[in-house]
Amino acid sequence: MAPILKKKRDCSHPKLSFKLAPMKLVELIYLACPFRHADPKIQAERCAAAHRAAAQLFNEGRHVFSPLTHNELLIEMLPHVPGEHWMQFDLAILAHCKYLYVLKVDGWEQSKGVQREITFAKERGIQIEMIEPSEFDKAHPNLLTSGLNHRRNR
């Protein structure tokens, strides 16, 4: 097992500067958003929308798990891993959440993944809230494309 890091790491985002609100002891929120699309630009826009929403919710002191935000680098590093594996991983986390927030970006109603997450939440009595992406568009205007761009450009 790797030793625990003793030194604080700088995890700041070069394009975002805001003070984090103190974390409150609140229930875990799962942020659902469609991902896959034939057009890579639309897929990147979906990721960016999820990143903005997750960042704002986190900044408000909420505990949020966003599969697109939290898994993006792993998906990029492990392209051979099938989508069903990621879905099973995500549903295991959703099972521990009090809320499912569905980010209503274009395609959410047709997304098999989002519909599966909604069904899973309903079956378990997880509260579902529909949220508009426009609520978060102005929160982080510099984050217009995939959040990984700052890593790629270093």
Image (cartoon, grey):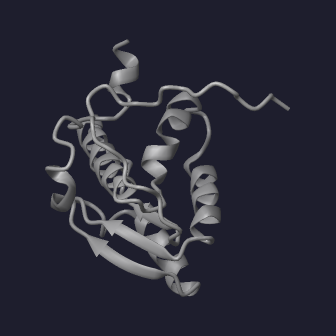
Looking at the image, which residue is at 35% across and 52% down?
59
**Residue 52 spot, x, y in % from top left:** 28, 48
Q: Quadrant of residue 41?
A: top left
Q: Quadrant of residue 87 in the image? A: bottom right
The x and y percentages for residue 3 are: 80, 28
Q: Quadrant of residue 61?
A: bottom left
The percent coordinates of residue 25 (x first, y second) are 53, 68
* Screen quadrant of the C terminus: top left
Which residue is rendered at x = 15% and y = 59% of the image? 134
Question: Looking at the image, which is closer to me, 127 or 23?
Answer: 23
Quadrant containing the N terminus in the rendered view: top right
- Residue at image position (36%, 56%) is 34
Relative placement, left or right, of 141 versus 63 is left
Residue 46, percent across and down?
Answer: 29, 48
- In the picture shown, does residue 123 fall above or below 59? below
Q: Residue at x 51, y 81 (%)?
A: 126
- In the displayed structure image, the side of residue 9 where residue 41 appears, left or right: left
Q: Residue furthest top?
A: 154
Number of labels in the image equals 0
Q: Is residue 91 above or below residue 142?
A: below
